[in-house]
Image (cartoon, grey):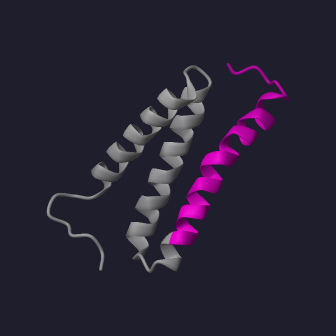
Amino acid sequence: MIASDSSLIPSVLAWLKGPLFAALATSAFSILFGLHSIDIALASAGAAVGWATFLAMRATAAPAFAAFVAALASTARSSAGRGPGRPLST
């Protein structure tokens, strides 16, 4: 059973603000540059995954290594979202 600690919820929400803002900013730029709806969702998910990975790695590793691992996670996420043979949106 999870202990009811009132300080846990604000800290989790504070940690989730970064990936949420990354996804929102990516969505705004995707709309600005005319991406299609599925591409907006994939780009936003990739941004959130990348930023969450960076925040998680930053707590345990050097900032340069954290940025490298976040770039790897974001690349893996973007490659997994697009199936083989599906062209980029025009």
Does residue 22 appear to the left or right of 75 in the view shown? right
Question: Where does the N terminus fall, quadrant-wise?
Answer: top right
The part of the image, by quadrant, that contains residue 41 is bottom left
Query: How far across and how far down the image is residue 42, in percent?
Result: 41, 60
Q: Observer-nearest residue: 12 or 70?
A: 70
51 with respect to 6 (left or right): left
Relative height, residue 63 to residue 78 (above, below): above
User: What residue appears at the point 46 percent right and 38 percent down from the top-left corner?
Assistant: 70
**In the image: residue 11, left or right of residue 32:** right
Residue 17 % position (x, y) = 69, 47
Residue found at x 71% / y 35%: 12
The residue shown at (55%, 21%) is 61
State which quadrant residue 23 falls in: bottom right
Count of labels in the image: 0
Residue at image coords 41%, 76%:
35
Q: Quadrant of the C terminus?
A: bottom left
What's the magenta region? 1-29
- Our reading of the magenta stretch's main secondary structure is helix
Q: Nearer the viewer, residue 74 or 15?
A: 74
Compared to residue 53, the image places residue 25 above or below, namely below
Residue lying at the far front in this picture: please name it: 64
The residue furthest left is 85
Question: Is residue 54 covered in magenta?
Answer: no
- Side of 26 relative to 88 (left or right): right
Decide whether residue 3 is among the magenta residues.
yes
Outermost residue, right side: 6
Where residue 20 sits in the image (x, y, percent)? Answer: 63, 52
